[in-house]
Image (cartoon, grey):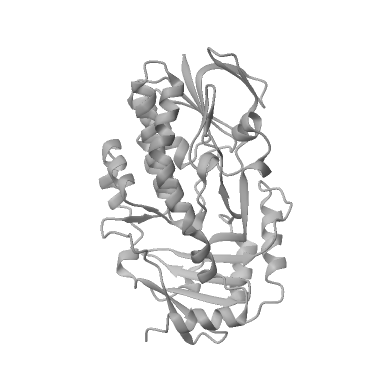
Amino acid sequence: MSILISGASVAGLAAAQRFSARGAEVTVVERAPGLRRSGAPIDVRGAALDVAADMGIRDTLVGHETGSAQRSAFAHIVDEIGEKVGALPTELPQDSPDDLEIFRSDLIDILHGSIGPDVTFVYGDSIQEVADTGDAVEVGFASGRAGRYELLVGADGIHSATRRLVFGPEERYRRHLGVYYGILSLPAELGADGESYLYSVPGRSVLISDYAQRTMGGFTFLSPEVAYDYHDIEQQRQLVFDAYSCVRGWKVAELLDALKQSEDFYLDSASQVHLDRWSRGRVVLLGDAAFAPSFFSGQGTPLAMIGADVLAAEWASCDGDLDQAFGRYEQTMRPRVRRAQEGVPEARDRIIPATWEAIEARNRRWPPVR
């Protein structure tokens, strides 16, 4: 009997590789028509580098670093006319020189390329019904197909359909941190001279960051939770336009113009996911579906890769005792997840202070580097 993985995310692709390497018959179902490659540059650090080595992709990842090692270890904070008024550290105390920063698109391609031809990918479809019979999971798909699997791995992100179908509504488990963030590629003329620049007004920040051959922009803003279709890119653009409609200064107008034309814009809420258990019967959650730490932590990708490796290893060694496998998976991963989630509020408040007083206090704490 085979294993179904819902979601061709970092977690889903890593799980497909790890389960397949241990002899599983794997199918990956992805709602999008192809691999979803948009998003901000991401970090592969710590034990995730060991997982990458076991997967045979660590050297390839090194060859695709963004070039951030050549930049300063801080982002210049600027005022409305572009004068430097602070320098926000971009490295964490636990960071190591071995850590890698890589574009999400490159990581997705490398992970996908590491998966053997025996793994089946089904795009443009999604799970719609789940029934755990005790000896199998019977799944109904939006396309009308049906399948029977030994195990269902929900690796379908912070808005996980697997979690909703098996564990209940999203609002039970996802904690909105009061922030939305959007990422997009920028034209070369908006480049930042090989550096990173951050401009803030109360509750709103914009970022421009240069990499070796690419410039990225970011919008980060405080907001209560808003109802919108997270599959509708035009609704997502409008959220940003509304949030920044009264923001003036620095390059905000140019960033908003770039947003109108962007083909790779990505937006989501900064949220965490908290569940008492990550499994139920023959269904188990992985990555952001189970334990999203939020993008402020810098740990989402490492946790996804480590979690996939741990889960597959425990499955392979449990001799059919899934309760034992899932228990060991949680026992290993929960301390890592807890540490990643705990440091998020401070990082959030540095990037998007809520008041002018908080902005000035941040800039005094981290004065400019000339």
Image coordinates of residue 215 in percent, x first then y, are 46, 66
Residue 63 lies, with reference to residue 6, above or below; the image says below
Question: In this rendering, would 168 be left or right of 66?
Answer: right
Q: Is residue 353 left or right of residue 53?
A: right
Q: Between residues 299 and 123, which one lies in front from this camera angle?
A: 299
The location of residue 22, given as percent across then percent down, is 33, 24
Which image quarter is the C terminus in?
bottom left
Count of marks placed on residues:
0
Q: Position of residue 197 (x, y in %)?
A: 47, 75
Residue for point 34% across, 70% down: 71
Q: Nearer the viewer, residue 5 or 132?
A: 132
Q: Residue at x 43, y 80 (%)?
A: 366
Quadrant position of residue 194 = bottom left
Q: Is residue 321 above or below residue 219?
A: above
Q: Quadrant of residue 14?
A: top left
Residue 108 locus on image (x, y percent): 43, 44
Please give the name of the residue rendered at 65% of the width and 80% of the height, measured from the top-left corner. Answer: 248
Residue occupying the point 44% across, 52% down: 340
* Residue 82 visible in the displayed image: yes
Residue 40 in sight from this viewpoint: no
